[in-house]
Image (tube, rainbow, N blue to C red):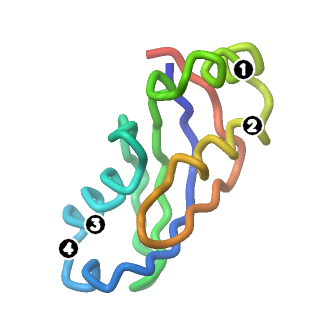
Amino acid sequence: MFVEGEVEIKIKDRSTAVLDEHGLKLWVQRSFKDMCCYRISEFHKESEKLVRAVVALKIEVLPNNEREIIENHPKDVGLLRGFLEKMFVGKGTCRAVGDPKLRPN
């Protein structure tokens, strides 16, 4: 299963200034813990320091107890947003926008 939702990422990594759109997508993918980013879609570069995208993150990387909490509360928007934001470890900040959804594989 995975959590899919729109995120807004404020980039603080100066090395991204020279990246094209494909390189920036790869940077976003690698910016999530344990390579849990399953898919990136609707990618938009708003400015040099801001990107928006819909990401799908695998929940299998979580410990069993945390994964079960998400599986047992699939409509808890706050929990799903927290998961999307918590899994971001890149240089910058990630904010979930909209209502993420828990989806089967």
Query: Where, by quadrant of the figure, is residue 79 drawn?
Result: top right
Amino acid at pointer 2: Leu
Q: Pointer 3 and pointer 4: residues touching (CB < 8 Å)? A: yes
Return the residue nearer the eye: 92 or 6: 92
Give the amino acid at mark 3: Leu
Amino acid tagged 1: Ile
Q: Nearer the viewer, mark 2 or mark 4?
A: 2
Horizontal side of 72 relative to 65 (left or right) equals right
Residue indicated by mark 4: 20
Q: Which residue is mark 2?
A: 79
Query: Which of the numbered marks, if any, corresponds to residue 24?
Result: 3
Whole-number angstrom distance, CA of label 4 to CA of label 1? 38 Å
Mark 3 neighbour density, 10 Å: few (under 14) some (14–19) many (20 or more): some
Sequence order check, earlier mark of 2 and 1? 1
Q: Which of 70/97 is in front? A: 70
In what element is the residue under mark 2?
Answer: helix
Proximity of marks 4 and 1: CB atoms separated by less than 8 Å: no
Look at mark 1 in the image and give the residue it sits on: 69
C-alpha span from label 2 to label 3: 27 Å
Q: Earlier in the sequence, mark 4 or mark 1?
A: 4
The residues tagged by marks 2 and 4 sit, at their Cα atoms, a distance apart of 33 Å
Q: Going by the image, does 104 lie left or right of 29? A: right
Q: Residue 26: x, y in percent?
A: 25, 56
Could you tell me how many numbered marks the image carries?
A: 4
